[in-house]
Amino acid sequence: QVQLVQSGAEVKKPGSSVKVSCKASGGTFSNYAISWVRQAPGQGLEWMGGIIPIFGTANYAQNFQGRVTITADESTNTAYMQLSSLRSEDTAVYYCARGVQLYQLRGWFDPWGQGTLVTVSS
Amino acid sequence: EIVLTQSPGTLSLSPGERATLSCRASQSVSSSYLVWYQQKPGQAPRLLIYGASSRATGIPDRFSGSGSGTDFTLTISRLEPEDFAVYYCQQYGSSPGFGGGTKVEIK
């Protein structure tokens, strides 16, 4: 049974960058997509992008193009999401989630990581 | 881009009552590509229904999904205390997208 464990909460200044990690255990890492989804306080869910580790190429949502970088390290079963040029509106909980379709970014997400709160404040 | 609209925004019901949640898509979605999640405060979303109508592992049979095309429904036949939460639909076409959520609260 796959488990995703994310890095801890972060507090960042506007204009800086944040990098959140997501370590997978208990299952196959490389062949299934890892997506990143964020949730602003009291708001809904927003897909940011995803990566299939064995292929190494990430796809990004249009809203985040140019500001987000998603990578994966197969040697440590860890995926990363880096968001740059942070602004107060980026304050949110960031989740990683595994796709369920082999070798496909499309699909639903199960399981999810526990979430990482990123606070952007001067 | 497919936009999902969930209604109502909030549903106030009592334990034991039936909950009917709607998810409407701006264009037709393959039934295979529509899923539902449950989210409780401070927790990550949890997969409930995939392929519009198939329950995920461990999900009680009081949860059911239906629909096709642009109109999908999540039904909770008899609300248990642990079912009061926020529910999201999601489609996964070329770019995954979520509905805005329906909060099921205790009346």
Image (tube, coloured by chain):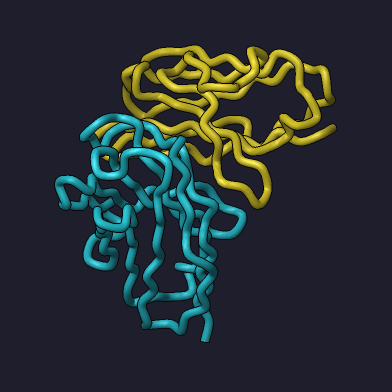
Chain colours: A cyan, B yellow
Q: Tell me residue A19's x, y (percent).
A: 37, 70
From the viewer's perspective, tell me whether residue A89 is left or right of residue A81.
right
Q: Residue furthest bottom?
A: A122
From the viewer's perspective, tell me whether residue B83 is left or right of residue A72.
right
From the viewer's perspective, tell me whether residue A37 is left or right of residue A10.
left
Q: Is residue A113 above or below residue A98?
A: below
- Image point (60%, 21%), residue name: B59
Q: Nearer the viewer, residue B14 or B6?
A: B14
Q: Nearer the viewer, residue A115 or A66?
A: A115
Q: Is residue B85 above or below residue B36?
A: below
Q: Tell me residue A122's x, y (percent).
A: 52, 87
Q: Tell me residue B16's x, y (percent).
A: 82, 18
Q: Nearer the viewer, residue A55 or A35?
A: A55
- Image point (35%, 31%), residue name: A100
Q: Nearer the viewer, residue A58 or A79?
A: A79
- Image point (68%, 37%), residue name: B85
Position of the C terminus of chain B, as image quadrant, is: top right
Q: Tell me residue B104's x, y (percent).
A: 71, 33
Q: Is residue A19 above or below residue B17?
A: below
